[in-house]
Amino acid sequence: MSDADVAGNLNAGLAGLRVVVTAGAGGIGLAIAAELAAHGARLAVCDVDEGALAAFRKAFPDALAQRADVSDEGEVDAFFDAAGAHLGGLDALINNAGIAGPTGAVEDLDPAAWRRCIDIGLTGQFLCARRAVPMLKAAGGGAIVSMSSAAGKHGYAYRTPYSAAKFGVIGLTQSLAKELGPANIRVNAILPGIVEGPRMEGVIRDRAAQTGVSYAEMEATYLNRISLRRMVPQHDVATTVAFLLSRAGANISGQSLAVDGNVETL
């Protein structure tokens, strides 16, 4: 069997799939949207970055791209109303939106910054699932893929809001998998590790400043905690999402899939 045949089998079922991707105009979300579009999925994405949304509309003129803050119930409702109208229904939700949150000792953290991180990274996933589930049920089933993190299974000193949100995503995922399985809705979480890109560079920079070491030293510390000793390309996360939405992932639910090179600790 050729590589093309293997890829075709793995991605069978993606053509025509109606998919919402939150925070889909940049970073991992954009990589996911591009991968799904390449296999014929139909897209509706939201984001808070107007510049990224404008670029997305040019690159994917057939997709809906709308501004929405996933922590704002009214904006989420407006986005899902528009997504439903644009797509004519829904087959999958990619709950991708999240922020890095503050870096600091727990006694120094701003409670407002804590709440903002939880509101976007966890409550936002609830608000989107709340609107997506009736649409998925109307379609006869579907899938939810929620973005957690390696920080969702390892404690993460000085990044407590982020880690707490990502642990919460795992609990939400496992609970929804049990609740929605009888409706033929699969729910899984992906746990990216140290993903290449500006966001990770910012995390390393902030952690280096917090602990008083250089950027290079902190980057080496992160890499030495990964068995494969390398960062993960965004595309690897995107192809895992495609696999979970494809026919090959038809019996995978309630799982937390690490795409991280085996992060041993954080």
Image: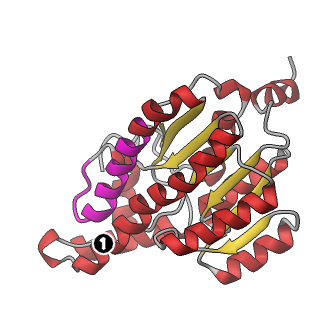
Q: Is residue 165 left or right of residue 73?
A: left
Q: Position of residue 110 (x, y in %)?
A: 23, 80
In the depicted view, which residue is nearer to us: 93 or 238?
93
Q: Is residue 183 magenta?
A: no
Q: Secondary structure at mark 1?
A: helix
Corner quadrant of residue 143? top right
Amino acid identity at mark 1:
Arg
Q: Position of residue 212 (x, y in %)?
A: 23, 74
Q: Is residue 157 magenta?
A: yes
For the point 45% across and 49% down, the residue is: 193
Residue farthest toward the top in the current orientation of the protein: 1
What range of the chain is rendered magenta?
Answer: 155-174
In the depicted view, which residue is nearer to us: 74 or 40?
74
Q: Is residue 117 left or right of residue 212?
A: right
Corner quadrant of residue 206? bottom left
- The reply to whether residue 4 is in sight is yes
Q: Position of residue 172 (x, y in %)?
A: 39, 45
Q: Is residue 187 left or right of residue 100?
A: right
Query: Where does the N terminus fall, quadrant-wise?
Result: top right
Q: Position of residue 52 (x, y in %)?
A: 69, 76
For the point 51% across and 37% down, the residue is: 188
On the image, numbered disc 1 is attached to which residue?
115
Residue farthest toward the left in the current orientation of the protein: 107
- The reply to whether residue 102 is in sight is no
Image height of 182 relative to 158, above or below: above
**What predominant SS class does the magenta segment belong to?**
helix
Image height of 1 relative to 255, above or below: above
Q: Is residue 168 left or right of residue 60?
A: left
Q: How many marks?
A: 1
For the point 65% across and 25% down, the residue is: 250
For the point 80% across and 30% down, the residue is: 12
